[in-house]
Image (tube, helix red, strand yellow):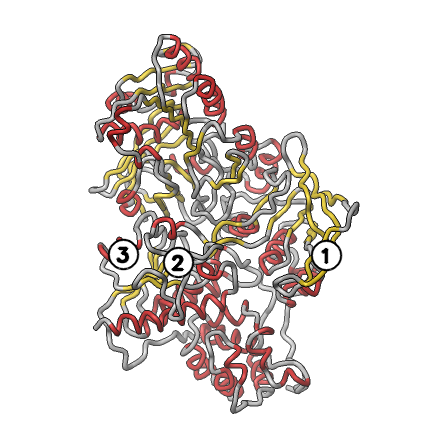
Amino acid sequence: MEVDVLKKVPVSEQDPQVRATNFDEVNLGYTKEEAMAEATRCLNCKNARCITGCPVNINIPAFIAKVKDGDVSGAYDVISASSSLPAVCGRVCPQETQCEAQCIRGIKGEAVSIGRLERFVADTAKDMGIKPQLPADMVKKGKKVAIIGAGPSGLTCAGDLAKLGYDVTIFEALHKAGGVLVYGIPEFRLPKEKVVAKEVENIKALGVNIVTDAVIGRALTIDDLFEKEGFSAVFIGSGAGLPRFMNIPGEQSLGVFSANEYLTRSNLMGAFSEKSRTPIMRAKKAVIVGGGNVAMDAARTAKRLGAEVHVVYRRSEAELPARAEEVHHAKEEGIIFDLLTNPVEILADENGWVTGCKCIRMELGEPDASGRRSPVEVPGSEFTIDCDAVIMSLGTSPNPLIKTTTAGLETNKRGGIIVNESEMTTRDGVFAGGDAVTGAATVILAMGAGKSAAKGIDEYLSKQD
Amino acid sequence: MFEIVAKKQLGTNVWYMEVVAPLVAGKAMPGQFLIVRVDDEGERIPLTVCDYDREKGLVTIVFATVGAETERMSRLNVGDHFADVVGPLGRPSDLTETPIEELKKKKILFIAGGVGTAPVYNQLKWLHDNGVEVDCIQGARTKDLLILEDEMKAVTKNLYFATDDGSYGIHGNVCVALQQLWDDGIRYDHCVVIGPVIMMKFACQLTKKLGIPTVISMNTIMVDGTGMCSACRLLVGGQVKFACVDGPEFDGWEVDFDQAMQRSRLYKTEEGRLMLELQEGDTHHGGCGVCS
């Protein structure tokens, strides 16, 4: 296979017009031939900057070298030494701002497609029946660690602790393990059975026990975990919480949803499928408010459920917080971007059903504290987008449930749990990571925190001996 | 899996079940709710806890068949299992966090309507077990719809019945009954109302007029029930609140009931119903407790 060293080997995708009507995965992944060809583009740098760009520090040149030789099993061993969820990361990590942003190839051309290669390795290893292994020299520690939440941070922390010899139990509030990987990210980006369920199985194969339908803070408190259940340390990875709204008139109307609700209905409850008994509104014309990855997920879901979709965002395209690839995919699928536009009121009929979204044009002013130019309203520029659904995708604040039921657990003014450099909270033996600490962020950052917490927990418990 | 160990029919379309759910039974308090799912395709259905047995690890639920999903629940029998039972969710009733001595000094009235009787029973039983004697008005359209009569009698000082058609107890709704008690000179200084939203609305209008501070419990549309989706949002004193984490109990004088009733129609107004019937056949959900 011929390779242009300046360009990534292209990957097959479902045709935009076809995929906009189904929930199958958009990106079809590399074949072995394509992966081995792409792997030849890696310069195998001695001072590999890509590794420093990876929140879980995968030895990227080492695994790519194995791919080049066609040794998928070897490549998988390298990746799984650092990452518990490679099939997930290969799909949803923002590689362009992490590992690939550091790639030397990127100076003169396109970076090596590390994400696609990671996904290829994880998927192929799964097809070959390869599972992550406990280290041969592992010694059982005889200590129990409780993990709250089976999302990216919790699964990562659990996997790492199991490899270190701890007896790990994950308590998950929902009926399915995976956290945002099952309730938030849609099927067409991250298949649930084929990918997420398999990654969860891999964590279980390391000996991790997962208890679903268990709400910590209610069914059991953190004090119960220590005092009654015999756990020696606890990791809180309870994730994001209450969705934010704009506090504009009409927001309580019928047809206004948080992206969390809309996506949870479609993803976790499977409402996009006829088989599911959970209802979801199939809008004719939907306005999605916000410009992040979650907004793109909501927009592309609404599109697939039959709506004409408008993304309304108050800044310009350059400031869209979503990954460029997501924006690109959304546009290909026919989603309309109304940029420099902000809703001011949601209009409804006499029965309370949404009939439109009144917006105002914005222009960019001076840079604000975040360094982004802050949008200001253009007086007199109001106009109305007719629609029957408005989906608010403005981020979330951390889930308050555990904080309010755990004495001595301090949070910052935004509700995030305060942790030190070992990810330990203000409660001895209680660690935390992911969105519960940072507020809404990415899967890989949560995994990085879970990994760092596993190290912190190991050090903490080792000192106790 | 969560086994059903007892089942009985309380009325034409009202069912009682005891289910093995040790994590819920271990911590449940009056005022809290749980979520059940029939099977892997099932919707998450929130239900208030009617009773619990910590030692046996059992919870009692009472529900009316108001849609396809509750209909499917009613077809489960002793020995069958729910795929999921999760809880307790929501905040316990404020009464359970008030010193008992203080409660004993109060004249407390409960008003229960329809399947709202189940969560009221849980609170009455807790108060009774703690030596607090209270009164209750139990209302229904007609005698056949009054549930848990013997159980309610056992845990109240005075239990009054009110039926719209006069087939049992006071002829009239719960407001007529409360006004009658008031006119007879009976006074209360705290009221808890649980039932259909329309009943809670009018009961709160009356208690406000009479000056009796009132707490109500909302059974809204929900998905996760843990503070993640905001489907359960409502306006309380002009502020957006989430029934699942801020409630389900709220100050009855402050709740915007009209808006809550409107929101409860999200998946069942004519348009919504038709749309859902088209898309989902007979699977339009119930479980909110207010669908008719």
Q: Earlier in the sequence, mark 1 or mark 2?
A: 2
Q: Which residue corresponds to mark 2?
A: A149
* Label 2 element class: loop
Residue B24, image x, y percentages: 31, 44
Quarter placement of the C terminus of chain A: bottom left
**Residue found farthest to the right:** A380
Q: Mark 2 and mark 3 in contact (Cβ < 8 Å)?
A: no
In front: A223, or A298?
Answer: A223
Q: Which residue corresponds to mark 1?
A: A339
Q: How many marks overall?
A: 3
Dot 3: few (<14), some (14–19), or many (≥20) neighbours within 10 Å?
some
Instruction: Indicate the amino acid at tag 1.
Output: Leu
Chain letter of the residue beneath label 2 in the structure image: A
Q: Which residue corresponds to mark 3?
A: A225
Instruction: Indicate the amino acid at tag 2.
Output: Gly
Q: Are marks 1 and 3 on the same chain?
A: yes
**Is residue A287 toward the left or the right of residue B85 in the image?**
right
State how far apart marks 3 and 2 are (Cα): 14 Å
